[in-house]
Image: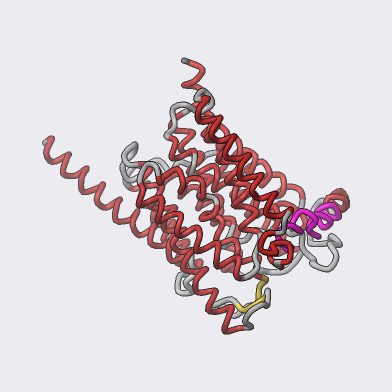
């Protein structure tokens, strides 16, 4: 009887691994936006995964953040379709349900098929599938860049659809990669080949974006690297030797860059890309944000009525949500974001959580938040943020870090 139960359990686990693999493949195909993977197919695969879990008596791992996000995005599409323009069934399905479903997937792919076993490896299955897809998409966009307009245009046709977008839109596909610069350097000391491979990918995707005159990804890289360095210092705050070494290295690098700039080594001040990048802080987007915030009391219920000048949109995911669908979806989305930030803080501060999570999940979430502060989110954008937000939520939920620390 015991052997029968064991064989049945092994069979169930094998089936779950097969369905899990199908979801990972879907993540990869969807990440480089393969046209054959329609929103209907994506929704069908995700729902099949949920039904399969329920049939095998597994918890769906829903929580307050899931319902908050689902309510925010469903309200958003209903109000947008009613007051702005009908998006069509495909986009409505994707934007209305996918952010919450991907959040749920982030939790489930970390927890199942085997609870508590190889969680870091499972994290990398999901993250690696998305990263590989984004890398492939970045490479094929270089072909589209050349075939559509050629250097140095900042607008060209999408490889799959032919629709024209600004280059900044494509810098999104570098966000996860550039957010892991510190992690790659840290990994070199642990697993040299893995760390070097990740670093090579980061350098390549950076090169592709710099070639297209993108600056968003570089800003994300610098801010997230410094934030992850701060996490490293927090983890090693009792080791004075490490803290002193980090401080000395940071000061030396800072002095080196200031000297290069001051003495104009290699005519660095005359490089157009450098001028564009350093102009990021005086970007016209900040003026758009001020205009949008001033008009918020006048347009509580959305309808895209704000006067945002030449661009016509807010260049910010939260403000654009407010402009499109009003104060309620905006508030729900803001609460979800704040709860995700709190999950990341708890993840970093806990002593009971593996360091690899700390140098991976919070930096990626921060990278997405920084991107969405300057660009809009959408069905092909916000879902990857919510996927990693789900991972953060599950890690914290499993470890209950503050409860453990207080008991000590």
Picture mark count: 0
Picture coordinates of residue 399, whole percent (x, y): 44, 30
> What main secondary structure does the magenta stretch of the protein show?
helix
In the figure, residue 246 lies in which quadrant? top right
Residue that appears at 66% across and 41% down: 335
Q: Is residue 2 magenta?
A: no
Residue 94 visible in this rendered orientation of the protein: no
77 or 371: nearer the eye? 371
Residue lying furthest top: 408
Q: Is residue 234 left or right of residue 270?
A: left
Q: Is residue 32 left or right of residue 225?
A: left
Residue that appears at 46% across and 58% down: 131
Q: Is residue 278 magenta?
A: yes
265 or 345: nearer the eye? 265
Residue that appears at 76% across and 48% down: 327
251 or 398: nearer the eye? 251
Q: Is residue 277 left or right of residue 300?
A: left
Picture coordinates of residue 78, whole percent (x, y): 68, 59
Picture coordinates of residue 241, whole percent (x, y): 50, 27
Residue 352 visible in this rendered orientation of the protein: yes
Picture coordinates of residue 49, whole percent (x, y): 39, 54
Q: State which quarter of the image contains the N terminus.
A: top left
- Describe the colour scheme in one phrase: secondary structure
Residue that appears at 69% across and 50% down: 259
Q: State which region is magenta.
A: 274-292
């Amino acid at each position: 009887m015991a052997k029968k139960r064991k064989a049945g359990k092994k069979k169930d686990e094998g089936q779950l691994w097969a369905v899990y693999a199908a979801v990972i493949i879907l993540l990869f195909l969807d990440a480089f936006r393969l046209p054959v993977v329609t929103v209907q197919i994506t929704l069908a695969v995700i729902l099949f995964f949920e039904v399969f879990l329920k049939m095998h008596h597994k918890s769906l791992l829903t929580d307050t953040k899931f319902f908050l996000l689902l309510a925010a995005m469903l309200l958003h599409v209903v109000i947008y379709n009613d007051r702005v323009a009908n998006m069509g069934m495909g986009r409505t399905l994707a934007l209305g349900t996918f952010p919450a479903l991907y959040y749920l997937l982030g939790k489930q792919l970390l927890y199942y098929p085997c609870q508590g076993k190889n969680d870091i490896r499972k994290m990398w299955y999901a993250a690696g599938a998305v990263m590989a897809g984004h890398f492939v998409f970045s490479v094929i966009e270089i072909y589209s860049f050349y075939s559509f307009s050629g250097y140095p245009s900042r607008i060209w046709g999408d490889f799959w659809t032919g629709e024209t977008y600004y280059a900044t839109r494509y810098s999104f596909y570098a966000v996860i990669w550039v957010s892991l610069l510190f992690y790659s350097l840290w990994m070199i000391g642990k697993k040299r080949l893995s760390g070097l491979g990740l670093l090579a990918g980061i350098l390549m995707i950076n090169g592709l974006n710099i070639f297209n005159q993108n600056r968003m990804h570089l800003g994300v890289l610098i801010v997230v690297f410094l934030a992850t360095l701060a996490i490293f210092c927090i983890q090693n705050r009792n080791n004075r030797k490490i803290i002193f070494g980090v401080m000395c290295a940071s000061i030396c690098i800072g002095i080196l860059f200031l000297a290069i700039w001051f003495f104009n080594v290699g005519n660095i001040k005359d490089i157009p890309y450098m001028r564009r990048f350093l102009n990021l802080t005086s970007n016209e987007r900040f003026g758009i944000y001020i205009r949008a915030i001033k008009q918020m009391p006048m347009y509580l219920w959305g309808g895209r009525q704000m006067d945002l000048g030449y661009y016509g949109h807010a260049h910010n995911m939260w403000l654009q949500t407010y402009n499109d669908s009003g104060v309620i979806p905006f508030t729900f989305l803001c609460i979800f974001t704040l709860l995700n930030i709190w999950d990341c803080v708890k993840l970093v501060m806990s002593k009971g959580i593996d360091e690899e999570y700390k140098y991976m999940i919070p930096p990626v979430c921060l990278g997405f938040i920084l991107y969405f502060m300057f660009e809009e989110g959408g069905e092909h954008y916000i879902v990857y943020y919510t996927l990693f937000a789900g991972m953060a939520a599950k890690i914290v939920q499993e470890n209950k870090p503050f409860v453990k620390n207080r008991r000590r």
